[in-house]
Amino acid sequence: MALRTLIVDDTITYRKILSDMLKDIGEIEVVATAPSGVIALKKLAQEHIDVVFLDVHMPDMDGVETLKRIKIEFPGVSVVMVSGVTTRGADTTIQALQLGAVDFIRKPDSPDAAANAVQLKSDLASVLRLITLKSLTSVKSIGKGTSTQSVAVTKPLLREPARSMAALPRSFGVCVIGVSTGGPEALSKLVPGLTGPFSVPILCVQHMPPMFTKSLADSLTKKSRIQVVEGAENEPVRPGVMYLAPGGRHMVVRKTEGRVVIGINDGPPENSCRPSVDVLFRSVASVYGDHGVLAAVLTGMGNDGCNGVRALKRQGCYCITQSEQSCVVYGMPRAVDEAGLSDKSMPLEEISREIEMLLTKGRMG
């Protein structure tokens, strides 16, 4: 069945561009377009819509306010933000993702119109694959009054026996996190739940393009008791600080003159990702392997991070995965779970407390 879409943008030219491209992709029905958030809400009340492509900046009611209304009034509708590449656009897009937008696409700004069209069509196809996958992993919906409860329908996991608690490191030298689709919302819940102070650093890869990770780091810092920064080349790794891989670039750690520093590089993508969780995790295994590593793999499509966790396990690592029911997309955690590499699978809302307990237990004796 074709996905029924609504395009919301105050620019008639962009409404037409998106409409034409979505029609070319196939399995998409552009049901309506709207020039504002107010009109979009009226059309949502009149038509069955699966996906809304929502412009970030609009007059009267901007994308964030429109998203908030959609989440309340039409909770079953997936919302994809359409963002410019300005800093203001990145800040607002991050806010929308933290509020529950499923993903975002950027308005290309290359002087090459043909290249812009190719990039936009590729981004649209990727987002639509994600939404289709998301719908397949929660295909049953049980109505309860005005609310709905999703029930995941998937085959049972084939797990290796869980590791014994005796394998839990006596203390940890670092915490690493890998996350992708649904990550900004997940991190906006997890990171503020960490009270600290911690005697170890936290290193995180969130799959994102350039510009957006700085906005995400700043947003998390404002909401949290720990400092979150975008990693930079040769920056010393400090305890109690969370380092976020910069968008579009790999982040690693290395030892230089007896201290651990951040490394940033433009190596080839791994698992079609740059930054890649596997790239970071492998470097952590080589630098921190004998100091105890706490790993968390959260919501995301694909399997990036699985091989990285495998490398960490060879050095001694305790790994937490986000449970299927609490994931936007149960891909990355599933890969780790099915490989028998997860020590504990838990709902997102419990992971902060678990990380806090594990990172502070050494101080508490």
Image (cartoon, rainbow, N blue to C red):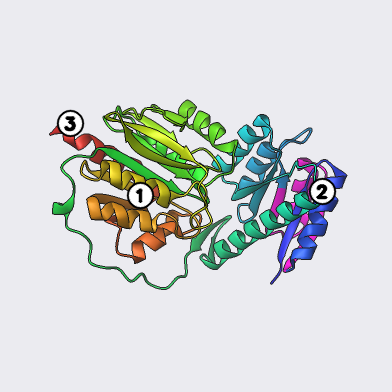
Query: Which mark lies nearer to you, 3 or 1?
Result: 1
Q: Which residue is mark 3?
A: 363
Q: Bounds of the magenta span?
A: 27-53
Q: In the rendered image, is residue 252 in sight?
A: yes
First of labels 3, 1 by sequence position: 1
Residue 118 percent across, percent down from the top left: 74, 55
Q: Around disc 2, counting alpha carbons within 10 Å, would you say few (fewer than 14), some (14 to 19), or many (20 or more)?
A: few
Verify whether residue 98 appears in magenta. Answer: no
Q: Which residue is mark 1?
A: 282
| Type of amino acid at the residue the image marks with label 2 | Ala
Left or right of residue 148, residue 81 in this image: right
Q: At x 51% / y 66%, what residue is drawn? A: 137
| Type of amino acid at the residue the image marks with label 3 | Arg
First of labels 2, 1 by sequence position: 2
Residue 28 percent across, percent down from the top left: 74, 65
Left or right of residue 57, residue 237 in this image: left
Secondary structure under badge 1?
helix
Disc 2/disc 1 C-alpha distance (Å): 39 Å
Q: At x 61% / y 56%, what residue is drawn? A: 76
Q: Which residue is mark 2?
A: 113
First of labels 2, 3 by sequence position: 2
Residue 168 percent across, percent down from the top left: 18, 49
Disc 3/disc 1 C-alpha distance (Å): 27 Å
Q: At x 40% / y 54%, what residue is drawn? A: 305
